[in-house]
Every structure is written in C-alpha cells, then in structure tokens.
Image: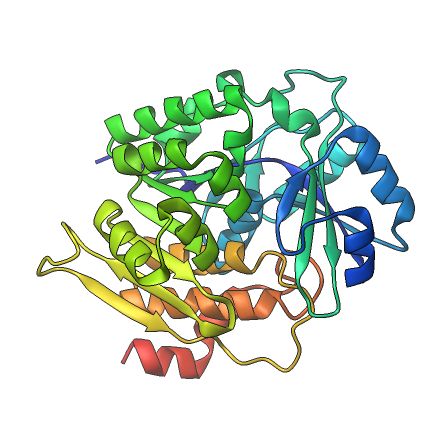
Amino acid sequence: MQKFNHDITFIGNAIVDIIAETSDELLTELDIPKGGMQLIDTETEDKLINILKEPTMVSGGSAANTAVGFSSFGGSACFIGQTGSDQFGRLFSENINKSNVFFENKFENKSNKTSKSIILVTPDAERSMNTFLGASIDFSINCVNEDLILNSKILYIEGYLFDQPAAKKAIYHCCKLAQKNKIQIALSLSDSFCVERHREDFLNLIKKFINIIFANDSELKALYQLDTNRSLWAIRNDVQTGAVTRGELGAFVWSNSGDASGEDHEEFAIEAYEIKTVVDTTGAGDMFASGFLYGLINDYPLVACGNLGSKAAAEVIQYYGARPKASLKGLINQDIFKERYFE
C-alpha cells in the first residue's frame, strides 16, 4: 500500500496580500474593475501602495490560502510556489510554515520581487484584486518537487497559474504525473476574468485530467458561456466531484462515479450560513474549498463536505484577510454540525 506523507499538495502563486479599505469612487478613478482581478505592472504596484492608507499585509495566494485553511482543519498539506528573495518572500515563507503547511522555496531568479495582490475592499465588502506577478513569472517545472506530489492523495491546482506559459507547462506536467500515479486532481477556476483569458485551456485540462472542481457562478458561466443551469449540467458531466459557490445563495455540490444520471450520483444545495456583518469577502471561495476538501479526504457525507465549506467561508468573511484567525477544527466540533450530519 502506498504511504502518504500528507493529504494534499497545493500548487499556486505565492503572493503577499496588501489589503486596504477604499471607495467605489476611487475604483472608478483608478479604472479598477470592481469584484474582479487584473494583472498590474511594477509602476502600478508602486502607485497603488503609495495611495493606500494603513494597509494590512499578510501572506496569501488562492491555493496557499486553501492549504492553510485545510491545515487549520487538521489536514496535512504542502505548498509549491515561487517567491522572490526579499522581505516579502521571507514573510510568505515564515507565515505559511507557521501555519503547518510545508513550503520549501526553489529560487529561479533571486532578483525578482515577491508577487503581491493589492486588494481594495469597498464598503459593501466586495474585493477588487490587483495582482503584481513578480517572482511568480519564474514558476516552471524546475520549481516542482515531484516527490511531494507522489506522496499525496490529491493534487490541487490554482487556475491563476495559467497566466504564465512556463507555469502552464508545469501544470500539465504535474497533472500527467498525478494521473499516471492515480492521484486525484483538483482545480480552482480562480476568477471569471482568468477563465475568459484561458477558456479553451481550462476546458482541455478539465476534460483530460480534473477529478474535483471548485468555481463560483460567474466563473462557471464564463467557462461554458451558458446560463447557470446549463453550465451546472455541463460541469457535472465533465467532472466527477465539485462545488459551485453562489455567495449569499449558498452553493451547489455533487459527486458521481460516472455521468450525472448514474445511480451513484449525489447532489445537494448548500445554504449559506448567516452572519451578522460581512467585512471582507476575500478568501471565501478558498476557505470553502478547504472545508470541502477536509470533509472529502476524511470520507464525510457529501452534504457534510458542502456545509463544512460553507461554515469556513462564513468564518473568514467576518474579518479582513483570507486566512483563518482561529482553528477551523472547532467548526467540526460544534454540536449542531455533528448532530446534523453524523447521527
């Protein structure tokens, strides 16, 4: 029997999040698309940082956030990504390792600055991300430790990596390695603008390699260029297991051993957990994935996986930043959760 050193290997951009409150008027003035993600150059990065007042700086990145969330639940995780050899790179490395996620950097270009995501949060808690790729552009096959993948149960991939040709090539290499060794492959679509940029590549990757998918409603519709219902039908037939999040409308989860009409097919509408105040939606989808994956890796019922994801998302949107401030394991131990799903 194969011995797993950890549950999941996560691959994504290693980014430091710089988070600040802003107004809709400033977004318009700066020509920043509200609620989306745009790539920025070093000049725009410097300009935005100089404008911000008292920003919060934490290590981030979509896949890294999910890895930390998964670890917070009690899962065993490692992360593969690329930082620069600077103070922000050290911040990222120290933070993610303190979160019990194994990370060992392989520098391809020490002169490049660590990637940053400047996240502007408007009063309605919507976040608009401005990503400076920096050292992430150096991510390639040379950065991949294959042993980490081979000693995992699941390989998790962040869709944002497709913005760089060398990283895209590395992703296909990792997927082939995982598939050959019967390791499950999960994909997060990351962002609707990212899907629009790489729609054909994503469809190809999904149909050839992906076993588990995470998306929100707008990402899914951008992928299939159909309405919500027809997009859900399409993704259920292309991917065995997945979750589509819909903000305050909750989420839709499914699992099937064959096509969506098979006898083993399961699907559930998951309600969003009510909270008093939404502060910052950054990381909600990442935390949903962490809870869902923790349930999946521990053979929880599918509906419990979905609800654990929903609880994790509700937890993180109550404060700034995309990482949990308290152990997410407590969400599992809450009596109401155990009584509802494990009687």
Q: Toward which corner of the image does residue 21 lie, by quadrant? A: bottom right
Q: Toward which corner of the image does residue 303 lie, by quadrant? A: bottom left
Inspect this view and state whether residue 314 appears: yes
Which residue is more in the foreground, 246 or 83?
246
Give the side of residue 93 with respect to residue 29, left or right.
Answer: left
Q: Is residue 163 above or below residue 129?
A: above
Q: For the point 50% across and 31% down, which residue is it?
A: 162
Q: For the point 25% across and 26% down, which residue is it?
A: 180
Q: Is residue 275 above or below residue 96?
A: below
Q: How many marks?
A: 0
Check the picture and name the quadrant holding the N terminus.
Answer: top left
Q: Is residue 73 above or below residue 80?
A: below
Inspect this view and state whether residue 299 appears: no
Q: Is residue 100 above or below residue 102?
A: below
Check the picture and name the quadrant holding the C terminus.
Answer: bottom left
Q: Toward which corner of the image does residue 112 lie, by quadrant? A: top right
Give the side of residue 156 with respect to residue 142, left or right.
Answer: left
How far across and how far down the image is residue 90, in percent? 74, 34
Q: For the point 62% across and 67% down, which residue is it?
A: 317
How far across and how far down the image is residue 268, in percent? 29, 70
Which residue is more in the foreground, 39 or 211?
39
Q: For the point 35% across and 83% down, which residue is it?
A: 339
Residue projecting furthest to the left: 263
Which residue is more in the foreground, 49 or 196?
196
Which residue is more in the foreground, 144 or 199?
199
How far across and how far down the image is residue 57, in percent? 78, 49
How far across and how far down the image is residue 20, in percent? 80, 56
Q: How is the image coloured?
A: rainbow
